[in-house]
Amino acid sequence: MNTGHCHLWKLSFSITFYRVWVSIISLLITSVSLSQTTNISGIINSYHSVIAIGTDAAKLDNVSGLSYGNTVLIIQMKGATINTTNTSSFGDISSLNDVGNYELATICSVSNDTVYFFNEVLNGYDVSNKVQLVKFGEYYSANVIDTLKAQSWNSSTGKGGILAIKVEQDLTLNAPLFADSTGYKGGAFYLHSGTCGFFNPVGNGYAYDATSGSASNGAYKGEGVADVPSNLDGARGAPANGGGGGNNHNNGGGGGANLTAGGNGGGNFSTGPSGCTGNYQGRGGKALNNTGDTKIFLGGGGGAGHANSTVQSYAGGNGGGIIFVLATTIIGNGYKISANGQNGRSTTYDGASGGGAGGTIIINATTYTGSLAIHANGGNGGNEDDDNSSGRCYGAGGGGSGGVIYFNGAIPGGGVSTSLSGGTAGINIDPLSCGAPAPGSNGTNGSTVPNYSYQASVTPSSGCTIALPVRIIYFNAFLTPDHLVKLEWDVADPDEANSFTIEKLDRYNNWKELSKIAVQPNLHHYETFDNGPVIGENIYRLRIKTRDNNTIYSLQKRVVLKTATPFTVFPNPAKDKITINGKLNKGTSIRLIDINGKTIKEIITNTSLNFLELQLPSLSPGIYILNVDNYIEKILILY
């Protein structure tokens, strides 16, 4: 081997090893319970079109994957009434109607093509305007190992644009939650002929057919809460929160909007030719009204810039999507939750396009650990390169508005940061010998809303009485001051139950009966105690045996009992052995587990010890879990 190559290989290996080492060390900060933590990535939701909806049920295009106990989101995506006259009032909203109405619901049964809900439907929905039902991804604890994504909004199917996750305990981010550019679509690119002149001047209207071959045309508008007829889908009027398209000739597109307005596109400020000039830039999308925090929206799409010279892969930026996070604890690890709008397309010799608006993020969490960035920024407007073409200066794109972030409590501080900036307007590059500049404008910043309660009905439905006679109102477990675990629950129909059983997960991941409680006539509230919780994690669930011999399970609840003298492990990182220091009683279970949950080595102490030297088998480099009587520690094996 060439010695120079050898030194380069060693240097490359050292740099790579260092990067891997830094990444792995960052993972050691958090502790997880492997047995109840699910590794997740990609798209975790399913999307279903609502064909009909009543007071307690919804008929769907398909019910695949839906079942009892599923948490779902019902939301209407379209249906606003707007002004469609070819005037400066085009796109003004006369009524939002039911668009943006949403609620969380829980499925109690599925029959044929219909799902039934525990509670009555809260809001009104018009199924002719794209109502969808989104199944949450639901977990006890979840570890995001690769980017978690929203399926992009598809106006043809009326589905997508939403990432929804519910985690009973810990949501650990080792990758981002991502709904950037998954909202309403930006105005599509269309290459016009560029027809205009002294005897065929450009039009100054607000709504044309985007594919028109006449001089009175304009680029495609961005998408928003109102559908626009195909003969009015071009030119500078902004359709509700969608950005307007730039008019002929080469005006820039406007930015999309959410609860605040998008920025106007830049205008044509050329000095000629006659009939081909005029500042007819796309208008910025109009701010929506969330009707007292009861409606939520995708970010509006940016309008396309008018083009007749260069082919582009896209034009207006897509809006940001919607993210719904329900969790007890979010462990950020320096990652991001984002629903940003897409930047508008930059171009040369044509009108540039507007940025998409930031989307909507709703977070309902009790605790935040580590650093976490939450972003719903507007996309920037595209730049227009005039390339020193004398007298020929065209419009840049307007910025998309910022989105909105809702928190169930106060706006968190510490390591949690938020960003809701409006997108910046694009600029003109190398203009030469033109008229007075007609720049675009930035999108308006978005907003953060504290103390928010998401929409959900609390009125029990009649549709579940036959489907499920015993309904769990709540089940909870918590540690008492004397270090016992109190378990309590309420049921709606106790007389339909035969028995209640509390089950506890043992160290081998088997459910064991902890206590059995008799049903009392007309008694809705029950409670019992675990008098012997273990150090570390204790996981419980409620099992109900009904009179018709069915079995119903509650969600799992976790209680962590911390010891004042936890064990320590060294060395860590390790190679072939580790030493465990701490009070190890007789019968202490010690397990070494790989990241996939496979037990590599297990011992049970036959006497009380203050330390134990544990010889390790030959292991591949990576992270392993040491479980000492349910107290968890991560171990790094380097080589």
Image (cartoon, rainbow, N blue to C red):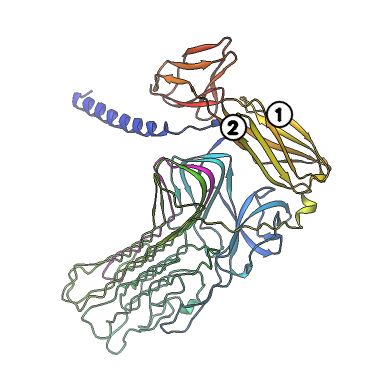
Sequence order check: which comes first, mark 1 or mark 2? 2
Please check the rendered image and state whether residue 338 is part of the magenta-colored stretch, yes or no: yes
The amino acid beneath tag 1 is Leu
- Mark whose residue sits in front, 1 or 2: 2
Vertically, is 168 above or below 578? below
Picture quarter with the C terminus: top left
Question: Magenta span covers which residues?
Answer: 324-351
Q: Which x, y percent locates residue 233?
A: 45, 75
Q: Which x, y percent locates residue 355?
A: 37, 64
Q: Nearer the viewer, residue 192 or 329?
A: 329
Picture quarter with the N terminus: top left
- State yes or no: discs 1 and 2 in contact (Cβ < 8 Å): no
Identify the residue at horizontal 54%, vertical 31% (top origin): 34
Identify the residue at horizontal 46%, vertical 54% (top origin): 179
Q: Is residue 14 left or right of residue 112?
A: left
The disc placed on residue 514 is 1
Identify the residue at horizontal 77%, vertical 51% (top origin): 467
Please check the rendered image and state whether residue 467 is part of the magenta-colored stretch, yes or no: no
* Helix, strand or loop at mark 2: loop
Q: Is residue 358 visible?
A: no
The disc placed on residue 481 is 2
Q: Nearer the viewer, residue 412 or 635?
A: 412
The amino acid beneath tag 2 is Pro
State the image quarter where residue 555 is shown.
top right
